[in-house]
Image (tube, rainbow, N blue to C red):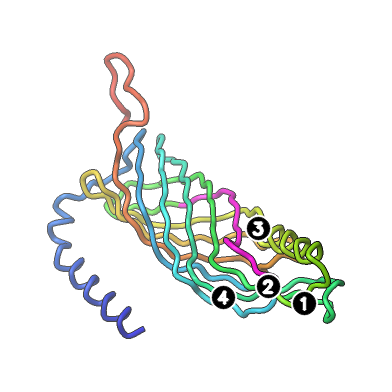
Amino acid sequence: MRMLGRTATVLGLAFLAQTPSLRAQSIIGFDSFKWYIGGQAGLTIFETPAQTRGAIFTAGGNLLITARRTGLQIAIEEGIKKNQFSAYSDPSSPTGTRQVIFNDIRKYSFTLLAFPIKAAAQPYVGVGFGILETAKEYPQGTFVSRAEQEAADSTAQARGSYGFGTLVGGIQFRVDRFALFGQYQITSSPPARKLFTGPTHSLMAGLRVSLGKAREDGPGGGESP
């Protein structure tokens, strides 16, 4: 934790030292009809029936396609941590509960974003949907047969994923072809008997780079300001 704190302090001081030059190159307003691709990293906060709410390191990539003051964001993220604990009801277990250990959390998100105002530090909000799943599940306990173990594996895999609705809020700062951004995301709670319980939260920061125009301008025309 001390190393992370020192690293964050050094990065923060480096960013502040570059603020005047970034401000000189910053672009005010929304960049319509462009493709952006980028990466992000941060924390995902979640809870399971066997584990209290906690945070794990998360990283991933995103694609943003902008229109007029709106955009479609597609993101894939992986929460990286081994030996996370959950459980589900299982009559074949002597205790009536089957403990499950899983590694990592994978999230796929599709979000429609709106950029309501023009500013150097530009806020945005969004609504969407996605899929959250555990990357690998290991049901615990004893099994009387190979078929019972395979059934437990299949059940744990099915209960390790669910579809969610999501709300997003963030802010971005554009510099030339680049966009620095910070974002908060909350997902809806899973149905009963899943390996997760309650909503998940994520705090991410990242960088996008423009790949160019998402559409060709019309004859003799340009983009609206």
Q: Toward the viewer: 54 or 183?
A: 54
Chain-order first, disc 2 or disc 3 = 2
What element does badge 2 sit on?
A: strand
Left or right, 20 with respect to 180, comes to left
How far is mark 1 from mark 3, CA to CA? 24 Å
**Where residue 49 sits: x, y (%)?**
69, 75
What element does badge 3 sit on?
A: strand
Chain-order first, disc 4 or disc 3 = 4
How far is mark 2 from mark 1, CA to CA? 12 Å
What element does badge 1 sit on?
A: loop
Mark 1 Cα-neighbour bin, 10 Å: few <14, some 14–19, many ≥20: few
Q: Give the range drawn in magenta.
A: 125-139
> What residue appears at the point 18 percent right and 69 percent down from the top-left corner?
14
The disc labelled 1 sits on which kind of residue?
Answer: Thr
Mark 4 Cα-neighbour bin, 10 Å: few <14, some 14–19, many ≥20: few
> What residue appears at the point 60 percent right and 63 percent down from the top-left corner?
136
- Above or below for 118 versus 96: above
Give the residue at mark 4.
83
Q: In which quarter of the image is the N terminus?
A: bottom left
Give the residue at mark 3.
161
- Above or below for 205 versus 215: below
How far is mark 4 from mark 1, CA to CA? 19 Å
Q: Which mark is on residue 142?
A: 1
The disc labelled 3 sits on which kind of residue?
Answer: Ser
**Where residue 163 sits: x, y (%)?**
65, 53
Give the residue at mark 2.
100
**Where residue 205 sits: x, y (%)?**
37, 61
The disc labelled 4 sits on which kind of residue?
Answer: Asn
How far is mark 4 from mark 2, CA to CA? 9 Å
